[in-house]
Image (tube, grey):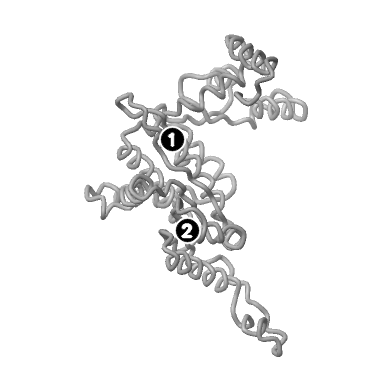
Amino acid sequence: MSQFLAARKLLLDRLGERGYRERMIVTTDLKKGVLRELADRESLLSFPVPANVGGRFSVLSAVGLFPAAMVGIDIQALLRGAAHMERRCREADWRKNPGYLLGALLYLFAVKKQRKLVVVMPYASSLLETAEWFQQLWAESLGKEKDRHGRVVHAGSTPLRALGVTDQHSQLQLYGEGPEDKVVLFLHLEKFGKACPIPAAFPDQESLAYLGGHSLAELISAEALATEFALTRQGRPNLKIILPELAAEVMGQLLFMAEVATVFAGGLWQINPLDQPGVEAGKQYTYGLMGRKGFEAQAKEIKEQLQSGDRYRI
C-alpha cells in the first residue's frame, strides 16, 4: 500500500488526474479490501484475485500473469504448462504424481531422517528468483505451530536457496561435511539460452588449456553434475528436477508442481497449508508502530518492552 501511495503521487504530479487514472492498474480482491474500495472509487482498471487464493499461491493468477505479460513472457504458454502439470497431478498413486512425489520426499526426509533444511539450488541465475519464491511458498505454508486438531506440533522444514555455481564454492563445504540436517534440491537446466564458448589460449598451461573448445554452458553443467556426485558419495541426500529449457511452458509446469507438492506435504503434516497465523502478529505490531487506528495496544506493548530495558525478549 505504501508503494501504491508513492506511485499514485508520482503519476498525479507528472500526468495529472486523468493520466493517473489511465495508467494505474490494480490487482486485488474482487469485492473486499481497501485497495478494492479505492479502485472502485477512483475508477481504476483492476484485475481480480480469486477469493480463495492466498498470495503465495497466486503466481498463476493475475497477480503473476499481468506483470509477466508486461515483461514479455508468453502467459498462454505459461498456463498451458500449468494445465499439463495439473493433469499429471491428478494421478492418485503418489509415486506417479510429480507434485505428490516431491512433497512426500521432502516430508519424509524431514520427519524420518531429520533433514529439516531444504536447500533449493538452481544451476542458472535466471532461476534464482524461482528458488526464492519457493522459499516463501514452502515456509509460510508449512511452518505451523498447531495441526488441524489443535495439537502443538511445530511442523515444517526450512527452505534455503543457493545458486550454482556461486554458492557451490561458498557453501558446499558445509553441505558435504557439516551437520547432517539438509537435503539439496537441484534445479538443472538442460539447455541454456547461450553457450558462451570459452576461447582457447595458453596451450603451455595445463590448468587453462583444457578449457578451450568448451563453453560456459558445458562448464556449469559439469559443475552441477560434479556437485551432485560429490554429495552423493558423502552420503548427503539430494534430488534433481530437470528442466529441458527456460521456457514459459516449462516454468508453468514447475510452478504448479511446487504448489501441489506444498499442499500435499501439508496434508502429510496434518496442518493447514493455506493460512499464515504466524505472519499476522508481526503485521499488527507494525500497524501499531505506524499509528494505525485500532492497534494502539500493540504499539504500547512494544514501547513498554523497550523502556523496560529487557530487549532480549523482543
Furthest toward the right, the residue is 13
Q: Position of residue 22 (x, y in %)?
A: 64, 29
**Is 233 displayed left or right of 128 in the figure?**
left
- The answer to whether 310 is drawn above or below residue 19 in the figure is above
Where does the C terminus fall, quadrant-wise?
Answer: top right
Q: Nearer the viewer, residue 39 or 287?
A: 287
- The answer to whether 133 is drawn above or below residue 169 in the figure is above
Q: Nearer the viewer, residue 195 or 174?
A: 174
- The answer to whether 149 is drawn above or below residue 231 in the figure is above
Amino acid, disc 1: Gly
Report which quarter residue 211 is drawn in.
bottom right
Q: Which residue is mark 2?
A: 187
Q: Position of residue 71 (x, y in %)?
A: 59, 48
Mark carried by residue 143: 1
Amino acid, disc 2: Leu
Where does the N terminus fall, quadrant-wise?
Answer: top right
Furthest toward the bottom, the residue is 204
Which residue is at 50% across, 70% downward?
226
Which residue is at 47% across, 39% downward?
139
